[in-house]
Structures are given as C-alpha cells and as structure tokens.
Amino acid sequence: MNPTSAVDNHTRSFHLRVFGCQMNVYDGELMRSSFARRGWAEQEDPAQASLHVFHTCSVREQAEERVHGLLGELRRVKKADPSTVIAVVGCMADREGQELFAREPHVDIVCGSRHFPRLPDMVERVIGGEQRICELGEAAEPVDEERRDLLARPASYQAHVAVMRGCDLNCTYCIVPSVRGRVESRPPSAIVEEVRGLVEQGVTEVHLLGQTIDAYGRDLDRGDRPSLAGLLDALEEVEGLARIRMVTLHPSYIDRELAEAMARSSKFMRFLPVPIQSGSDSMLKRMKRGYNMKLYRQRIGLLREVMPDLELISDWIVGFPGETDEEFEASERAMEEIAFLQSYVFQYSPRPGTVAHDIQDDIPMQQKARRNHRLLELQRKIAKERTPTHVGQQDLVLLERESEKNPGQWFGRTRRGHYALVPEFPEARPGLEVPVDLVAYTGRELQAAHRLSSQELADLADKSPALIPAAKTPVLSFGV
Ligand code: SAH
Ligand code: SF4
Ligand code: F3S
C-alpha cells in the first residue's frame, strides 16, 4: 500500500525557477536532486506547487526585478494558502539579505549561494512552524563536498560541473565577488569522479564552471596545489568523454602551462570564453579589470601560438559611466582585431555596493542600446567572415539534434564551436561525435559530409557512451 495520500503529494511538490549563469543552472540540478531524494516531486505548473524556489541572479538590475515581479504575484497565493513555502536562494539572497523580508514579507526563506545544500532542511523547519529563515555568507561545509546526485539531472549528453566557486577579483561594476564569496576550489579527485559518473550516464560533453576558472587551485596550499592544466590532463583519461568546455577564463590567470595543457588535450574544445569587457585601456582601468590591451593581446597570443585554430568568445559592457565615443570605438576595433567568434553584450547596470555604483550612471539608455546593437552587428559580420574559412577542412561534429529547418540533416557543433549540418544516418543521436569534411557554408552554418562509411559510423555509435535517461523525479513521496 502506498502510504502517501494525495494531499501529501500536493504538499510535497516544488516549482523551481532558475535565473542567471550556468553555475545557477548546475546548482538548480543539485537542488532538484536533493528535493527528489527526500520525496519531493517537481511540479512544472507553479499553481500546483506547495513550495516555490527562486534561484536568483544579481548581476544586473533587470534580473532582480523579474524575481520581485514574480514574488509579487505569489503574494495572493500565499494569502489564499498560508502553508505555501517561498524560498529565495542564491545571489539575490546574498545581496539583499534580511531586507528581502521587508520588501517581500511573504517570503519564508532567504538562502545564500553557499547554503543551498541545506535548503530542504530549512523547508522542513518552515513546515514545522519556524518563520523567516535567513542563512547567508560563507558556510561551514564546502558546497560541493558531496558526490553529485544524478537523480534529477535532465537526460542530456551535456553536463555542467563546478570546479570552483566565488571570485577573488574586484571589477568595479561587478556584484559577483560580494555575493558569491571568495574562491573555493574543489579537489580534482571529486571533479574527475563526478565526470566519470556523468559519462556512465551517457554524457559526452562537460562544461567545467568557475567565475575565473583559470584561477582554479590558487586558493589551496602551495604544496600539492592542483591546477586547471593538471585537471585537463586527468580528464584526458576519462574514456568516452568527447569534449571539455570551460566557462569562464580571466586573462590575468592564463599562463603557458595552461595553454599547453589545452593544446595537448584531445577533448578540450577549441572554443573558449575569455571576456575582454572593453577594448579601451582607460575603460579597463576604470573597470579595474587588472589588464590592459597589451596584456590581453599577449595572453591571447600565447593561446593562439599553441592552438592556431582557437576560437574565442567574449563578454562586453557598453555604457559604463563616462564611456566616450572614442572608448566605445576602441571596443569595436578590439572586436575586429581579436576576431571573436561569439559575443555577449551587456548594457551597464549599476549595482548597489559596487565601486562603480558611486559614479554617476551618465550614459543615456538609448545610447547604451545603440552601442549594444552596433557591437552585436559587428560580431555577426565577423562570425560570417570567419566561419566559411573552415570550408575544405576536416573536423569533428558533435551531434545535438535533428535539424528542423533542414530535414535529413543533424545539427551540431565543430570542435571550434561552429554550427554545422551533418547528413542523417541510422545511428545518429545527440552527443555522438563524428568525423567529417566541411564542404560548404550555407550562410548560417557549415555543411558537413561524412568521412566514415555507413559501417564505420555504426561501429563508432556502438563504441560511444549511450544516453541513459536519468530517473524521473518521483511523483509520490516515500517520506522524509
Ligand atoms: N567572471 C566573468 C563574468 C561573470 S558576470 C568574467 O570576469 O568575465 C557575466 C558578465 O556580466 C560579465 O562578463 C559582464 O560582461 C556582465 N556584467 C557584470 N556586471 C555587470 C553590470 N553591473 N552591468 C552590466 N553587465 C555586467
Ligand atoms: Fe565579476 Fe570581475 Fe570576478 Fe568576473 S572577474 S566575476 S567580472 S569581479
Ligand atoms: Fe548572476 Fe550570481 Fe551568476 S550574480 S551571473 S547568478 S554568480
């Protein structure tokens, strides 16, 4: 007999909304698993959930305002059913702290980024009658100590893996160091074990995550300090893992040892985010990025010396206080000079508590929007020029999905991050990496032709890890 009544089932259902960076997506998966392990069922329809979890971002004002808007809508829900539990987790919790209760009195839990592993306990305490739980700042236990529970991970060939948390830099515009705390690196053995576990589930591409991932290990004792280079070498041994991506590098920490480890790795994807933010030395100084254009060029030069085929991704901020036309134009020139393949452009948003917040936000909104548009247009043009230069080359494409626009073709990415179409074959599936010739450019993506015969493709699929669907979040609870 099932001990759980329908009422229990309703009271043990949660709705999770995730905002912000990939680290939040990853932490969202960890949270899902820990609730599932305790018998909670995920509910896609918020109206059916008894627990609402917001995993939040503070990097720009807009992201916070969206959460406040959604919290506002829940006021009514909480009034109608006071047993509804509302938790605000992550960067906004850390930034607003107790003040969040003042603006949103119906919120029950404010849980900082380093405390979410204990969120299910906090929810139990609220159900038990405790009010307004607030846990912030550094935690006694490292966030990633436990082995990752794969129970509620979406079945995908791609997976995130945190290698470090926090940031020890102090860019003048950025809220991240104050909300995420100091750098805390995970032991390499835990990371490698987690990746192996993921590959057993059919994962072929991992994205290693850290705010300044190339600072990995620098917070640990000098004696047997791990490094990102050492981690790449260790991951080379993981059979079945096809690709490693990294998010995000900071130019200051790039050195020859790391560049060479990337170059010798057969799995490292030659597609790397090294955000520049601006191409103007005076802006970089005001942003306190810790490098100027000369140093940025040197570091990129080091990477491209050992990996001539490396493609780069950047973030840019437009409309930082005092940004002149000349300074903005320096960013346009840098985008062309470095020839990034992809860019994310952000309009400056003043964040309370940061150094830049005290400087007047003097660039009008329309000006920010114009600069944003101009940079994106330029990026599109550069990508359109760079991509066709790969026609005629051999590459590997990791299949993502069947192309909707191009029947009979699979959509994927080359080792250097270019979109490509691959003719379908019976064993094609997401996460399978196949060797191809790049034969044409469609104006949007590269067209690939198979280098392997049908029999060789079948053998390749047979040898590659197959996706094992992760267990679905149990719908009925088995008690807590
Ligand atoms: N650690 C990464 C960036 C993390 S935040 C790095 O140093 O590159 C992600 C991006 O958000 C940043 O690269 C920056 O472009 C943007 N960003 C951060 N603070 C911002 C702010 N106050 N206004 C607008 N964009 C911001
Ligand atoms: Fe923010 Fe700068 Fe740290 Fe990136 S390096 S997280 S932009 S402070
Ligand atoms: Fe946002 Fe926090 Fe990530 S501020 S970008 S969710 S580290």
Image: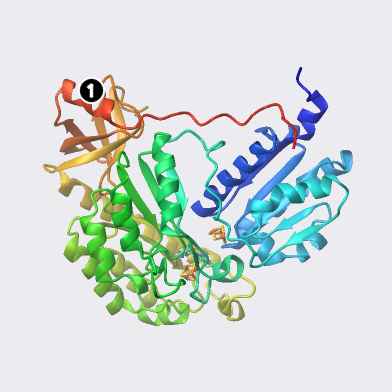
Left/right placement of residue 353 relative to residue 411 reads: right
Hey, which quadrant is residue 49 in on the image? top right
| Residue 358 locus on image (x, y percent) | 61, 81
Quadrant, the C terminus: top right
| Residue 279 locus on image (x, y percent) | 34, 73
Q: In this view of the protein, can residue 378 be seen by the observer?
A: no
Depth check, front residue: 438 or 30 = 30
Look at 57% across and 79% down and name the residue there: 355
Q: Residue furthest top?
A: 1
Q: In this view of the protein, can residue 375 be seen by the observer?
A: yes
Look at 19% across and 55% down and name the residue there: 309
Q: Residue furthest left?
A: 392
Depth check, front residue: 280 or 232 = 232
Q: Secondary structure at mark 1?
A: helix
Residue type at tag 1: Ala
**How many numbered marks have been drawn onto this rendered protein structure?**
1
Say above or below: 362 vs 394. Answer: below
| Residue 236 locus on image (x, y percent) | 28, 50
Quadrant, the N terminus: top right
Depth check, front residue: 231 or 251 = 231
Look at 14% across and 31% down and name the residue there: 451
Q: Which residue is mark 1?
A: 458
Depth check, front residue: 60 or 88 = 88
